[in-house]
Image: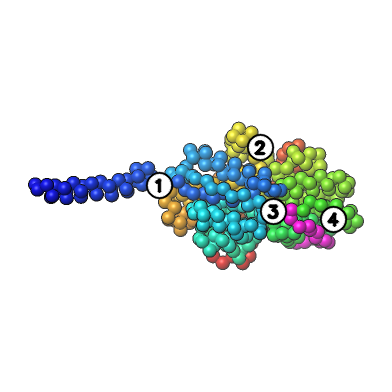
């Protein structure tokens, strides 16, 4: 063989080897890590809620050996501060700068609404592990948006059912004046008035304001049979303590969607004892699934889980179901979403399915605050779907 022909052949062999090598790592090492953007509050009144969601999500991933559908997970984090005015910029850090595959977030409804609009535009997969904004599974519903939590209407409605059943006739409501508060109150009023009650006045203050005194004075003057409140996190701690300190707890029963006392009982102390709420989780379900979750969470984080931890855990379960169905091939997004939509989530809260609008269809428990637990005393509404008003999908 002539030297020039020998050179040609060895160059060709080298080129082939190089091209094979270039494709080899993908086949040999499997697919690259899935990029998960966590957009949650790390500061402000909802900071503890964000931590619990992240803990729950990571606990489920750890239980699967650190992979979902065979994919390692790489996290990208943004503190959204529960600030809607920064929400579009914040979500775009994950979408455009970090180029994540999926976003998990957030807690605050106003922030989540901006996120939903952004992911509709970019077609990024979004799993909402708390924020209840009705529009997310209403007019803004989309194939790429799935919730592992609730719609604001749901816990409000369930609490209205209980309040009416207890025979209260005149209610006042109090909340922060943003989507979560307004929509939860709407759900409460719908069920309470259907059950024969009347809401005589709605009170509100801007989020995250906690100067409740003037509003408590008004409640004392109006003397309703019951007060319904939506507050959460640090704001819920302050409200429950102020309600008690104002002397109202003894005279006018206080009820709320379960966020009023979830993850807050230690800080609320005696002021929360005996409060009745409704939510899709309680601390004393005492099922094998919930007990196993609670034990693992307590051992891992040296803290007790709450509803937010459960929703984070279930966000990871939802993502896992999609990824397993496509063997980790995230490009098969339609097949992934179809698997997620059809799954029955084996949640610590109890099994639930997703509605056509991608919102959990789930039981709502009656809970009573006893010691450091929201103890389940019954079921307010079984398998409650969200009405998904305005969703066209
Ligand atoms: C919300 O903004 O949707 C929300 C915040 C905290 C607890 C529950 C709902």
Quick check: marks 1 and 4 in contact, CB under 8 Å?
Answer: no
Q: CA distance from mark 1 to mark 4?
A: 56 Å
Q: Position of residue 348 (x, y in %)?
A: 60, 43
Mark linked to residue 54: none
Which residues are the magenta region? Answer: 193-208
Q: Position of residue 135 (x, y in %)?
A: 63, 62
Mark linked to residue 304: 2
Disc 1 or 4, which lies upstream in sequence?
A: 1
Q: Which residue is mark 1?
A: 31
Mark linked to residue 215: 4
Residue 88, located in which quarter of the rendered image? Answer: bottom right
Question: For the residue with label 2, is its CB less than 8 Å from the closest atom of ligand 1?
Answer: no
Q: Nearer the viewer, residue 136 or 120?
A: 120
Residue at 13% in and 49% down:
4
Disc 2 or 1, which lies upstream in sequence?
A: 1
Q: Which residue is mark 3?
A: 155
């Amino acid at each position: 063989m002539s030297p020039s022909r020998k050179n040609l052949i060895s160059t060709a062999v080298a080129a082939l080897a190089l091209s094979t090598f270039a494709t080899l790592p993908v086949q040999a090492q499997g697919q690259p890590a899935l990029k998960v953007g966590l957009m949650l509050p790390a500061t402000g009144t909802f900071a503890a809620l964000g931590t619990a969601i992240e803990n729950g999500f990571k606990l489920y991933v750890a239980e699967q050996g650190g992979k979902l559908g065979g994919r390692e997970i790489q996290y990208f984090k943004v503190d959204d501060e529960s600030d809607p005015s920064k929400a579009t910029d914040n979500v775009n850090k994950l979408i455009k700068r970090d180029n994540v595959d999926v976003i998990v977030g957030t807690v605050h409804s106003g922030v989540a609404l901006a996120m939903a609009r952004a992911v509709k535009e970019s077609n990024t997969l979004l799993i909402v592990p708390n924020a209840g904004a009705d529009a997310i599974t209403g007019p803004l519903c989309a194939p790429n948006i799935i919730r592992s939590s609730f719609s604001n209407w749901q816990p409000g409605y369930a609490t209205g059912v209980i309040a009416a059943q207890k025979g209260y006739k005149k209610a006042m409501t109090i909340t922060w004046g943003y989507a979560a508060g307004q929509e939860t109150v709407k759900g409460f009023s719908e069920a309470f008035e259907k059950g024969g009650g009347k809401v005589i006045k709605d009170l509100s203050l801007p989020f995250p304001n906690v100067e409740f005194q003037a509003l408590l004075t008004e409640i004392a003057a109006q003397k309703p049979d019951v007060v319904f409140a939506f507050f959460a996190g640090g704001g819920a701690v302050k409200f429950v303590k102020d309600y008690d300190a104002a002397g109202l707890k003894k005279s006018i029963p206080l009820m709320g969607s379960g966020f009023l006392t979830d993850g807050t009982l230690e800080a609320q102390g005696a002021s929360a004892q005996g409060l009745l709420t409704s939510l899709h989780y309680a601390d004393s379900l005492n099922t094998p699934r919930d007990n196993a979750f609670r034990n693992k969470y307590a051992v891992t984080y040296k803290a007790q889980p709450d509803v937010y931890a459960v929703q984070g855990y279930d966000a990871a379960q939802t993502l896992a179901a999609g990824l397993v169905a496509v063997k980790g091939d995230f490009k098969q997004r339609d097949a992934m979403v179809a698997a997620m939509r059809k799954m029955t989530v084996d949640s610590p809260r109890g099994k639930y399915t997703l509605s056509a609008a991608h919102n959990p269809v789930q039981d709502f428990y009656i809970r009573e605050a006893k010691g450091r637990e929201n103890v389940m005393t019954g079921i307010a509404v079984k398998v409650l779907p969200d009405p998904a008003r305005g969703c066209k999908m």
